[in-house]
Amino acid sequence: MPAPKVVRITVKDKTANLPVAGQGVILFSRTTATNAKFTFFSDNKLNRLSVEFSEGGVRVTAKEPLVDSTNTKGLVADLSACYWFSVDSQNQILTAGVGEPRMETVVYSYKFPAEVHTSNKQFLESLTHVTYDAENIYVPMGFTPLRILRDPITATVPLTLKDTTGLTMDDVASGKIMPVANLPTTSQKLYNCIAGPKFCLETQAFPEFYAAIERSIVTPGCWCYETLKKKATEFSKDRPNILETYLRITLGQNNGESPGIPYVMEIWPAAHYSPVHSHAGAEAVIRVLEGGIHVDLYPYLSKEAAPFAGADFVKGDVMWISPTLNQTHQLRNVAKATCITIQCYMYDGENDKHYDYFDYLDEKGMTQQYEPDSDMDFIAFKQLMLEEWATQPRGCCVGWGRRG
């Protein structure tokens, strides 16, 4: 399936038009602890679908209550949580969730009875507008007062990318691979910049680049070792944590189109990891250049939120991030060797409210801001590794990639 299309909407008197009649997803967060309410209705206002999120669950009413007997979850205490509600007239299904708009976060689902297919479909297709309580519903990142996705939530969305050279019929049929062509234009641009066969770490001029990085990580006095040591308090201000560190080697300049410099080579020593963090509503692609990395996905950024999915990626694999999916995650190198990734970020063309920070959870579970920085420029870093490799002793170094 394609990545969700976020639609910029015009709001008048707390009312917005659905991009397509009878379908779409409402995304919102709360500003207060009160219930969240909104109503879908037809042009003549004769047909209505009312929705209310409360702590006890999700209540949906047309002419009568549309009950999901398994629904016991709704609003959560943390106001940073986000929510969504999906209308799907083609499949005649209503779904709601807590967190990112995806099947993995569903807490409410209702399918209309098949025996009245035509009338139900006509009812849903008549819904063209949504009105809401603007006092307690909003969406951050500059999209006010809410966002709408054009297409309903119908299937799980894969994290792994493939382009036409590797995509098979089985990949498309199984829904386990995201075709690059289904990404938004901005993400396709990022992918095409870093996915080529020659976009690799080691070159004929410096075939030992990866080995030099690994040795620099474990050798006191070398740049990687000393820089990682200095960064031990970067995310844990009160409790230095050498394992919660990684190196950011940037390629190019910040042109105002991304949170920080758009192309960053990140170096993950064995057992090192990032804090749980989100990505400023930007689009992104991440390619593994060497080693492997584990990714845990979270529904939203909060100490109360648990990961809903995890995946392992190895050399050559590419994953993706959109403004509404895969935004909140944690990266962890669970292997014995250093992992090196290339991270690419860019705001899409509709984002005119740039948020130039990554939010993350500190050691106390509090949300903090991190302004993406650079530990060194790529060209300078490569030259430094070349010099270290030429001058450091070649002695056997047990456990390269693991600091001990």
Image: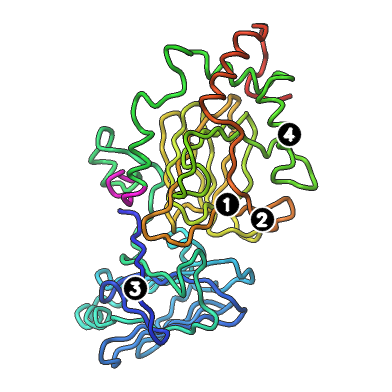
Q: Which residue is mark 1?
A: 358
Disc 2 target residue: 368
Residue hosting label 4: 230
| Marks 3 & 4, CB-CB < 8 Å contact | no
Q: Amino acid at mark 2?
A: Gln
Within 10 angstroms of label 3, few (less than 14), some, or many (20 or more) residues? many
Q: Tell me which numbered mark, 3 or 1, is placed earlier along the sequence.
A: 3
**Residue situated in front as seen by the camera: 219 or 230:** 230
Q: Which amino acid lies under the numbered mark 1 shown in the image of this protein?
A: Phe
Name which residue lies at 36% across and 36% down.
193
Q: CA distance from mark 4 to mark 1?
A: 20 Å
Judge from the rendering whether residue 110 lies leftward or rightward of residue 391; answer left or right. left
The amino acid beneath tag 4 is: Lys
Q: Quadrant of the C terminus?
A: top right
Say if mark 1 contacts mark 2, CB within 8 Å.
no
How far across and how far down the image is residue 250, in percent?
Answer: 52, 34
- The magenta stretch is 178-186
What residue do we see at 49% from left, 43% from top?
Answer: 254
**Disc assigned to residue 106:** none
**Residue mark closest to the camera, 3 vs 1:** 1
| Residue 182 belongs to the span the image colors magenta | yes
Viewer-nearest of discs 3 and 4: 4
Q: 357 and 69: which one is in front?
A: 357
